[in-house]
Image: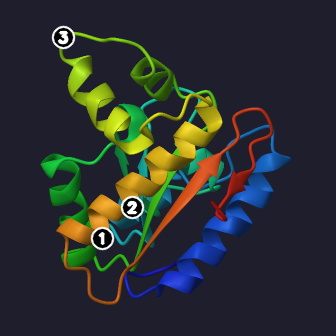
Amino acid sequence: MQNNHTNASDALARLMEGNKTYIDSVKAIGDISPEKRLFTTEHGQHPYAVVVSCSDSRVIPECIFSAGIGDLFVIRVAGNVIDNHQLGSIEYATEHLGCKLVVVLGHTGCGAVGAALHKNSGYVQSITDEIKRAIGDEHDEQKASVLNVRHSVAVIKERLTLVGVDVVGALYHTDSGVVDFNI
């Protein structure tokens, strides 16, 4: 069982290995056993990474990385945008839970990125306006998704003082299940 002293490179390797397992899986792999629930109830959570991902129902970080109860500290918001709520959650996970890796996980076919390419109103506009700032004049949705991830990574690095914590961007391909960390 991992503890909260996992360094960033070990956490990234674990995510990458979990994604390899997921690609060929037909069922969830992570430990969701009653014993794991009881252990985390009695001993607290010790996630090895923070994952900021989109709220899209096809993007399930625990499955994508073959993770179980207590393994990941997941923050989900449409378009994986970053505001004070996400920053506070990241700060909590890194300072209080000891996470050494933060991953901003965008994905192909992101509806929020697609919506940012059009005029919006209402509450969704707060999300699409942030994405629009990130993507500028880009009209290719996949390229825009990558730019959006990079922007969120930059916001986290700029606004939080994260000593000994790595922040990386990644893109989940909804068709193949592959996570590309080289974006």
| Residue for badge 1 | 157
Asked if marks 1 and 2 touch (Cβ < 8 Å), the reply is: yes
| Residue for badge 2 | 153
The residue lying at 43 percent from left, 25 percent from top is 112
Q: Secondary structure at mark 3?
A: loop
The residue lying at 54 percent from left, 53 percent from top is 33
> Three-letter amino acid code at disc 1?
Lys
Comparing 61 with 1, the one in front is 61
In the image: residue 15, left or right of residue 90 = right
> Three-letter amino acid code at disc 3?
Gly
Pinpoint residue 41: horizontal percent, then vertical percent. 29, 60
Q: Secondary structure at mark 2?
A: helix
Q: Is residue 44 visible?
A: no
| Residue for badge 3 | 122
The residue lying at 19 percent from left, 79 percent from top is 161
* As drawn, 169 above or below 177: below
Quadrant occupied by the C terminus: bottom right
Counting residues from the start of the chain, the first of labels 1 and 3 encountered is 3
Residue 92 falls in which quadrant of the image?
Answer: bottom left
Pinpoint residue 22: horizontal percent, then vertical percent. 75, 50
* As drawn, 116 above or below 165: above
Using a 10 Å C-alpha cutoff, classify the residue at mark 2 as few (fewer than 14 neighbours), some (14 to 19) or many (20 or more). many
Using a 10 Å C-alpha cutoff, classify the residue at mark 3 as few (fewer than 14 neighbours), some (14 to 19) or many (20 or more). few
How far is mark 1 from mark 3, CA to CA? Answer: 29 Å
The residue lying at 65 percent from left, 77 percent from top is 13
How far is mark 1 from mark 2, CA to CA? Answer: 6 Å
